[in-house]
C-alpha cells in the first residue's frame, strides 16, 4: 500500500481543488486572446478579415481609402481585423464562472460585448471566439503537465 498511498494522496489533492483546471484555462486564455486581439485569427487560424477600402466619410472626414485608411489614421490598422477598436472586448473577455454549474469558460463581462462578438462572427462569417486546435492542444498539454507534476509530489 505504501507505493499507492502517495498516488492516492496526490489524486485526492487534485480532486479537491481546481488549480490544475484554472491554470490550464488561464494559460490557454493568454494564447487565445493573443490569437484574436493581436494576430487577428479565427478558430481555423485564418485572418478574421481586412478593413474595407471603399471610399467613405467617417465622422465628417472623407477617406478615399475607406475604413482601412480611417483605422490607419488612428494607428489601429495592422492590415487586418484585430477587434481592438476601444479594447473593451479584449479587456472584458476572460475566464468566467458559469453560474448554473460553477464550471469555468471564456466569456465577456457584459451582454453588450457578447452581442458585439456575435455580430462580428456573423459579419465575417467566422468562428472567432471558438477554441482553435492550438488552444485545445495547449489546454490538454498544460493539464497533463500539471497532473504529472502533482503525481510526482
Image: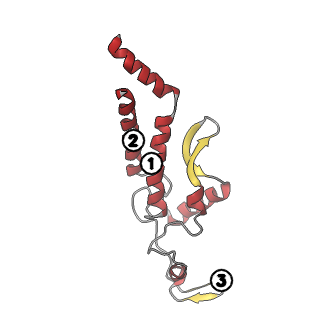
Looking at the rendered structure, the secondary structure element under dot 2 is: helix
Left or right of residue 60, residue 76 in this image: left
Question: For this rendering, which residue is in front, 48 or 15?
Answer: 15
- Name the residue carrying label 3: 59
Q: CA distance from mark 2 to mark 1?
A: 8 Å
Question: For this rendering, which residue is in front, 43 or 32?
Answer: 32
Q: Residue at x 60, y 35 (%)?
A: 102
**Of the image marks 3 and 2, the number of the one nearer the N terminus:** 3
What is the x, y in percent for residue 36? 47, 60
- Asked if 146 appears above or below 16 in the picture, the reply is below
Color scheme of the displayed model: secondary structure
Circle number at residue 142: 2
Left or right of residue 149, residue 93 in this image: right
Left or right of residue 43, residue 92 in this image: right
Question: For this rendering, which residue is in front, 128 or 73?
Answer: 73
Circle number at residue 28: 1
Q: Are marks 2 and 1 in contact (CB under 8 Å)?
A: yes
* Label 2 crowd (10 A; few <14 / some 14-19 / many >=20): many
**Of the image marks 1 and 3, the number of the one nearer the N terminus:** 1
What is the x, y in percent for residue 83? 53, 66
Q: Are marks 1 and 3 in contact (CB under 8 Å)?
A: no
Question: For this rendering, which residue is in front, 43 or 5?
Answer: 5
Q: CA distance from mark 3 to mark 2?
A: 47 Å
Q: Quadrant of residue 35?
A: bottom left
What is the x, y in percent for residue 50? 46, 73
Q: Residue at x 46, y 69 (%)?
A: 49
* Label 3 crowd (10 A; few <14 / some 14-19 / many >=20): few
Looking at the rendered structure, the secondary structure element under dot 3 is: loop
Kindly give the residue lying farthest to the top in the view shown: 1
What is the x, y in percent for residue 53? 49, 82
**Of the image marks 2 and 1, the number of the one nearer the N terminus:** 1
Amino acid at each position: 500500500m505504501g507505493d499507492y498511498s502517495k498516488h492516492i494522496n496526490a489524486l485526492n489533492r487534485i480532486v479537491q481543488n481546481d488549480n490544475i483546471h484554472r491554470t490550464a484555462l488561464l494559460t490557454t486564455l493568454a494564447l487565445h486572446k493573443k490569437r484574436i486581439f493581436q494576430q487577428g485569427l479565427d478558430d481555423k487560424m485564418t485572418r478574421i478579415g481586412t478593413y474595407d477600402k471603399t471610399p467613405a466619410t467617417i465622422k465628417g472626414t472623407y477617406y478615399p481609402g475607406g475604413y482601412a485608411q480611417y483605422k490607419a489614421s488612428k494607428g489601429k490598422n495592422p492590415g487586418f481585423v484585430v477587434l481592438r477598436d476601444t479594447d473593451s472586448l479584449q479587456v472584458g473577455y476572460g475566464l468566467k464562472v458559469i453560474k448554473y454549474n460553477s464550471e469555468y469558460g471564456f466569456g465577456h463581462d457584459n451582454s453588450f460585448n457578447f452581442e458585439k462578438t456575435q455580430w462580428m462572427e456573423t459579419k465575417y462569417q467566422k468562428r472567432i471566439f471558438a477554441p482553435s486546435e492550438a488552444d485545445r492542444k495547449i489546454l490538454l498539454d498544460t493539464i497533463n503537465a500539471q497532473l504529472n507534476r502533482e503525481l510526482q509530489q
